[in-house]
Amino acid sequence: MPHYNGTKSFARLRQEIRQKNEGECSRVDVLVASRTRKSKKAVNVLTLEKNTLAVDVLGKDTHWYLRAYGPGKSITQHFKVKPSRLDLSQELIEVKKKADQLIEEARKDAECARMEAEKAKKEAEAIRNDVDRKIEQNNAIWEKKFHQLTNFIKGGTYDDDSGNESSS
């Protein structure tokens, strides 16, 4: 039973069917659409809708090519049957790639967090040094004021900041 797609690929035909049927496309839909002529004369749909006949007509699963569906999907994948070793190995490769990507992202995030922590530590150290310096300045001022106050109480003289002595 030849198809009447011409140069149109099965993938493109599937995409058109999905757009018409709101995302759904079966093997039988592709088979019927590819065997329908421009004059809209189709093959006998009733015989194709029976799975046993459809599998007989469409053939066995061969090397990632599903007849009347195109490359990229096998019969076992289409009918959700037990995966082959090739399927499992490809799935394992995909999982490893995804895990490696997630590990790399985690490393980058950890490195960014470490750099931010170092930056915050440096900023905190700078603030601490500034506060310590200001405390030293205030302590020196209070020490000077206290010394002036004790001198005033003992001797009755007061030294202001300009160095002039005054008595009361």
Image (cartoon, helix red, strand yellow):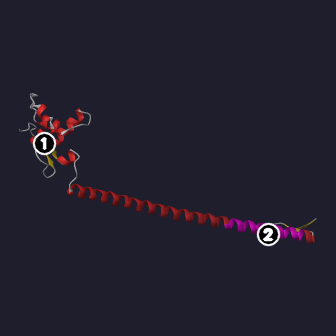
Q: Is residue 67 left or right of residue 121?
A: left
Q: Is residue 117 left or right of residue 63?
A: right
**Residue type, numbered disc 1:** Val
Q: Nearer the viewer, residue 140 or 90?
A: 90
**Residue type, numbered disc 2:** Glu
Q: Whole-percent x and y of residue 64?
A: 16, 51
Q: Earlier in the sequence, mark 2 or mark 1?
A: 1
Name the residue rendered at 10%, 42% in the picture: 56
Magenta stretch prevailing secondary structure:
helix
Residue 164, visible in the rendered structure = no
Quarter of the view holding residue 132 = bottom right
- Which label sits on residue 143? 2
The outermost residue toward the front is: 52
Name the residue rendered at 66%, 64% in the picture: 131
Instruction: Give the vertical position of 86 relative to 42 (above or below).
Output: below
Report if residue 149 lies within the magenta region.
Answer: yes
The residue indicated by pointer 1 is 55
Quarter of the view holding residue 11 = top left
Highlighted magenta segment, given as a residue range:
132-152
Q: Whole-percent x and y of residue 26?
A: 20, 38
